[in-house]
Image (spheres, rainbow, N blue to C red):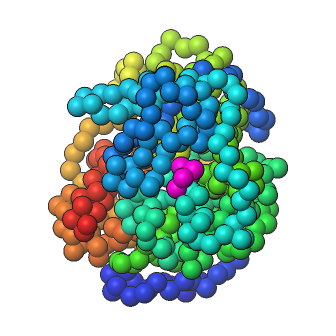
Amino acid sequence: MTKSCNFALGKKSVVKSMADLVKIKRGLDIPLVGEAAKNIQTASKAEMYAIVPDDFHGVTPKILVKSGEEVKVGTPLMCDKNRPEINFVSPVSGTVEAVNRGERRKVLEIVVKSDGKFDAVDFGKLDAGKMDAQAVKETLLKSGLFAYIKQRPYDVIANPEVEPRDIFVTAFDSAPLAPDFEFVAEGEEAALQAGIDAIAKLTSGKVYVGVKADSKLSLKGCEVVKFQGAHPAGNVGVQIANVAPVNKGEVVWTMSAFDLLLIGRLFTTGKLDFTRTITLAGSEVEAPQYVKTVAGASIASIISGNVKKADHNQRIISGNVLTGTKVSAEDYLRAYSTQVTIIPEGDDCNEFVGWATPGCGKFSVSRTFGSWLFGKNKKYNIDARLRGGERGIIMSGEYDSVFPMDILPEFLIKAVIAFDIDKMENLGIYEVAPEDFALCEFVDTSKLPLQQIIRNGLDALMKEMN
C-alpha cells in the first residue's frame, strides 16, 4: 500500500490503493477466559427498559415525555436541546415509568415499563433507492437512529447539517470476548444491505465497510476492505487511518454494523426493531453464550441464572473490558453495547509479595511473569484491579507497541494535557477517539486514565473551534 499524505502538512486525503488485505502489525489480543459459545439464547423478558443520556456524549437532553405517558417503539423520549432535530426514542412500547434525575437535576435515565407487545410507530414503506439524501436523513432523525452515527473529528453524534467526506462502517469487533458480527447477522443480510443503501445516500463520497480477513459478507454499493491483525484492528479509527485518514477541515461519519442493522430493519419493514444479539461473556459467567435481547433492557434479564456463585465481588460491564461501562444488575444495557462482560472485581484480593511471585497464572505484556512460557493459547482470568498507582508518563514506547496508527501517542497525550492546540493538531487529534487509546491504557505502567484524557481534549478542542 502507498503511504497517505502526512496529516501535519494539512494536505488533502489520499485514499490508499486498495489491496486485498490490510495487515495491522501492532496491537494486542487479551486472551480472557469466558468466550461465548456460538449458540443463541433468548433473554428472559424484562419489565423495565431505559435510555441513558450519558451514552450520547455531548448531548444536553430535553425530556419530551412525562411519567405515566403511553409510548410505542419509536416514540421520542428526549431530544438534544442544542440540536432538537436529533431524537432519542423508546425501544419498547408501554408506559413511561420514571424520569430519574441526579444532582442538579441531571437526567440519569428515562425508564419505560414494557407492555410486552412491542407496538411500533409505522414509518410507512421506505425504499432508499427512491429517496434523496434529505429524505433519508429526515427519516433517521425522526426515528432516533441518527444517534447511532458518529463523526470524526471529536467522536460525537454526527452533525446532520454537514455532509461527510466518506462514511466508515466497521463490521467486526476485535475487542476481548466481543461478538462475531457475521454470526449475529446470519439471516439479516437483506437488512444489512438496506442499511448500506440508506447511508450511501448521505455522502457524495464512498461508504467503506471494514471486515475481518476471512469475511464471507457480500455487499453492494460500498467498498469492502479486509483487515487482519490483533485488536484494535476492528476499531473504526484504525480502519480510517489505513484507508483514508482524516485531515483538518474534513469530516467523516462512522458507525458499527451492529447499529447499521437497526437502520436496515427500519427500511425493510417500515418499523423500528431494537433487538440485539449480544454476548454474555467473562470468567464469572456460568455458560458464556450469545443472548437475544433489546437495547435498553435491564441487565438482570440478561444475566439471570447464568452468573457463577462466588465468595468474591464481581464486576458487571455493559460493553467490553477495555471501553465498557461498569453497571449493576439493576442497571440497563447501554445504547451502543453489544456485549455484557462479567469478571472478578479483585478488591478483596491480598497477594503475598504481589508482583514478586512467579505469576504463572498472570497475564503480562512485558513478560514480567513466567506465564509467557505457556504460549499464546493460554487464557487468563483477569480481574478489574488497577495493579498500581498513578505516576508521571514514562517515555518507554509501550504505547507504540499496541497503537497501530501513524501517530505518536505519548506525545499526543502530553499535548492534550497541556492543551497545546497546534501540537494536538499536528499530532493527529482529529483522527482519534478515546477507544483508540484503550489498549495504551491497559499496558500503561503510569496507570493514567488515557481515554478520559483524550475525551477531555476532544471536548475542549471542539468548544474552542466552535
Where is the C terminus found, in terms of image quarters?
bottom left
At 35% from the left and 34% from the top, the residue drawn is 107
In the image, residue 347 lies at what x, y percent? 38, 22
Residue 427: quadrant of the picture: bottom left
143 drawn magenta? yes
In the image, residue 124 lies at what x, y percent? 71, 53
State left or right for residue 165 relative to residue 392. Answer: right
Total marks placed: 0
Residue 206: quadrant of the picture: bottom right
242 drawn magenta? no
Camera sees residue 366: no
Q: Which residues are magenta?
A: 141-145
At 55% from the left and 25% from the top, the residue drawn is 95
Where is the N terminus found, in terms of image quarters?
bottom right
Predominant SS along the magenta part? helix
- Taking depth in this image into account, of 38 and 69 the one nearest to the observer is 69
- Taking depth in this image into account, of 71 and 352 the one nearest to the observer is 71
- Taking 52 as reference, is 459 above or below it? below
In the image, residue 232 lies at what x, y percent? 53, 57
At 30% from the left and 34% from the top, the residue drawn is 106
- Taking 60 as reference, is 331 above or below it? above
At 62% from the left and 72% from the top, the residue drawn is 132
State left or right for residue 237 relative to residue 39. Answer: left
- Taking depth in this image into account, of 54 and 338 the one nearest to the observer is 54
Residue 102: quadrant of the picture: top left
Camera sees residue 67: yes
In the image, residue 2 lies at what x, y percent? 55, 86
